[in-house]
C-alpha cells in the first residue's frame, strides 16, 4: 500500500496576502487542500501534517532541520515516501542538511515549493506538488525509485545536496550545476536511473544525525577584501571551520598578508575548505600557482560542492567529531553523493 506523507512547513506555496500590509504570510494547510482537489485523484493515500508555526524559509535554523528529521523518523515505517513543502529561499540548505542527517535513508524525501502561491491563477505550486507526490510514490524493481533527499522544482528532480537557488523569478528556480538531474517531468516523468543513488545494503534502520556544530563561517573572496575583517573573522574564538568561496578552479590572491592570515589560521587548527564561487565546475588547487599556494598553507579542497552542502556537511562532521584533524580526514568521504572526487 503506497502512502505518502506531505509535511507542510510554510513558504510561498501556502502563503496569501495580508489585506492590511500587502505582504505574503503563511496560511494553514487545510486551505491548501481546499485549493487542490486534484490530490483526491491519486489512487493511493496522501496524508498531511503541518508545522507550527509555519515559517518563511528565511527563518530556517538547524533546530528546524532536527524537527523535520524527527517528523520523518516518527512516520518512517508508516509511509512509503515524504514530500516536504518548504520555502524556496533556504530549500537548498535544508535539502543538503537532511541528506547528511538522515542516515541509511531508503525512502524518497522530496522537497518542493513554488514561486507563486497555490491560490494564484498561474501558480507553479500545483504542478510542483503533484509531480513531487507522484515521484515519491514511484517504485522501481520492487523498491522506491528514489531513496535520497531531492528537490523537485519546475520540471526537474535534483539531488538535494547539489542544488542552489538561482532564480528569484523563474519557475525553474534551482540549479544543480555539477550533477545531472535525476528525473524530468514532461508528459511522462522520466527517471535518469544511472544517476540515482541506489543503496547497496537495504534493511538498515533509519539513523538520525542530529548533533550539529554550527561554528562555521563563510568567507567570499573578492578584490578589495579588507585584511582586518578577514583576520577578525578567522580569529573568532569558537570558530572551527571556514568555507572560502574562491575564484574559478579554487584560486585566491597570493598577497603576503592574505596567505599569512590563512597559514596562521590553519596552524591554529582551523579547517579551511575551498569551494568555487562559479555556478558549475569545481576546485582543482593544482591547476594554477595561486591555487597551489592555498593548498600549501593547509586549505582543503571542497571539490565541486555547493556552498550550501559544504556548510551543512561541516555542521554534521563537527557535531560528530571534536578533533578538527579527524574532521579533515572525514571531509574527504562522500556521505550522500554531495561531491565528485576524480
Ligand atoms: N520567502 C519565501 C520562503 O522561502 C520564498 C519562497 O517560498 O519562495 O519561504
Image (tube, grey):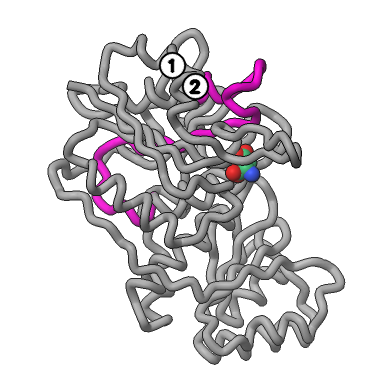
Residue 198: quadrant of the picture:
top left
Q: Position of residue 268 (x, y in %)?
A: 54, 91
Q: Position of residue 93 (x, y in %)?
A: 52, 52
User: Mark 2: which secondary structure?
Assistant: strand
| Crowdedness near tag 2: few (<14), some (14–19) or many (≥20) residues, C-alpha within 10 Å | some
Give the mark nearest the N terminus, 1 or 2.
2
**Residue at image x 67%, y 38%?**
24
Foreground pick, 240 / 10:
10
**Residue at image x 55%, y 43%?**
163
In the picture as drawn, the residue positioned furthest to the front comes out as 20
Residue 327 visible? The answer is yes
What is the magenta range?
A: 99-128
User: Mark 1: which secondary structure?
Assistant: strand
Residue 318: quadrant of the picture:
bottom left
Q: Is 83 contained in the magenta span?
A: no
Q: Position of residue 316 (x, y in %)?
A: 39, 65
Apparent side of residue 137 relative to residue 227 in the rendered image (left or right): left
**Residue at image x 66%, y 17%?**
122
With respect to residue 48, does 52 lie above or below? below
Q: Position of residue 22 (x, y in %)?
A: 75, 37
Tell me the number on the disc at residue 305. Answer: none
**Residue at image x 63%, y 88%?**
235
From mark 1 to mark 2, how far is it between C-alphas?
6 Å
Q: Disc 1 designates what residue? A: 189
Residue 30: quadrant of the picture:
top left
Tell me the number on the disc at residue 184. Answer: 2
Circles 1 and 2, Cβ within 8 Å, touching? The answer is yes
Foreground pick, 26 / 294:
26
Amino acid at each position: 500500500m503506497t502512502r505518502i506523507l506531505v509535511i507542510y512547513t510554510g513558504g510561498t506555496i501556502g502563503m496569501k496576502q495580508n489585506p492590511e500590509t500587502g505582504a505574503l504570510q503563511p496560511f494553514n494547510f487545510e486551505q491548501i487542500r481546499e485549493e487542490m482537489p486534484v490530490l483526491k485523484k491519486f489512487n493511493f493515500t496522501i496524508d498531511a501534517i503541518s508545522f507550527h508555526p509555519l515559517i518563511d524559509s528565511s527563518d530556517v535554523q538547524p533546530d528546524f532541520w532536527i524537527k523535520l528529521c524527527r517528523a520523518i523518523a516518527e512516520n518512517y515505517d508508516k509511509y512509503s515516501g515524504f514530500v516536504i513543502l518548504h520555502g524556496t529561499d533556504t530549500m537548498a540548505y535544508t535539502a543538503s542538511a537532511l541528506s547528511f542527517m538522515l542516515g541509511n535513508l531508503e525512502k524518497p524525501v522530496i522537497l518542493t515549493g513554488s514561486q507563486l502561491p497555490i491560490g494564484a491563477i498561474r501558480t507553479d505550486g500545483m504542478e510542483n506538488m503533484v509531480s513531487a507526490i507522484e515521484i515519491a510514490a514511484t517504485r522501481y524493481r520492487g523498491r522506491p525509485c528514489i531513496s535520497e533527499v531531492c528537490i523537485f522544482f519546475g520540471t526537474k528532480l535534483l539531488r538535494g545536496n547539489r542544488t542552489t537557488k538561482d532564480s528569484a523569478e523563474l519557475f525553474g528556480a534551482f540549479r544543480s550545476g555539477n550533477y545531472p538531474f535525476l528525473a524530468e517531468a514532461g508528459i511522462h516523468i522520466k527517471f535518469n536511473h544511472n544517476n540515482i543513488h541506489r543503496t547497496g545494503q537495504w534493511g538498515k534502520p533509519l539513523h538520525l544525525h542530529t548533533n550539529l556544530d554550527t561554528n562555521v563561517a563563510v568567507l567570499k573572496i573578492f578584490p578589495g577584501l579588507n585584511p582586518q575583517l578577514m583576520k577578525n573573522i578567522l580569529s573568532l574564538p569558537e570558530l572551527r571551520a571556514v568555507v572560502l568561496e574562491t575564484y574559478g578552479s579554487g584560486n585566491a590572491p597570493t598577497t603576503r598578508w592574505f596567505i599569512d592570515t590563512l597559514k596562521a589560521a590553519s596552524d591554529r587548527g582551523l579547517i579551511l575548505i575551498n569551494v568555487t564561487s562559479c555556478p558549475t565546475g569545481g576546485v582543482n588547487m593544482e591547476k594554477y600557482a595561486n591555487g597551489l599556494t592555498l593548498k600549501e598553507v593547509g586549505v582543503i579542497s571542497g571539490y565541486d560542492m555547493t556552498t550550501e552542502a559544504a556548510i551543512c556537511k561541516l555542521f554534521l562532521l563537527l557535531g560528530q567529531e571534536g578533533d578538527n584533524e579527524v574532521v579533515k580526514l572525514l571531509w574527504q568521504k562522500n556521505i550522500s553523493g554531495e561531491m565528485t572526487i576524480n
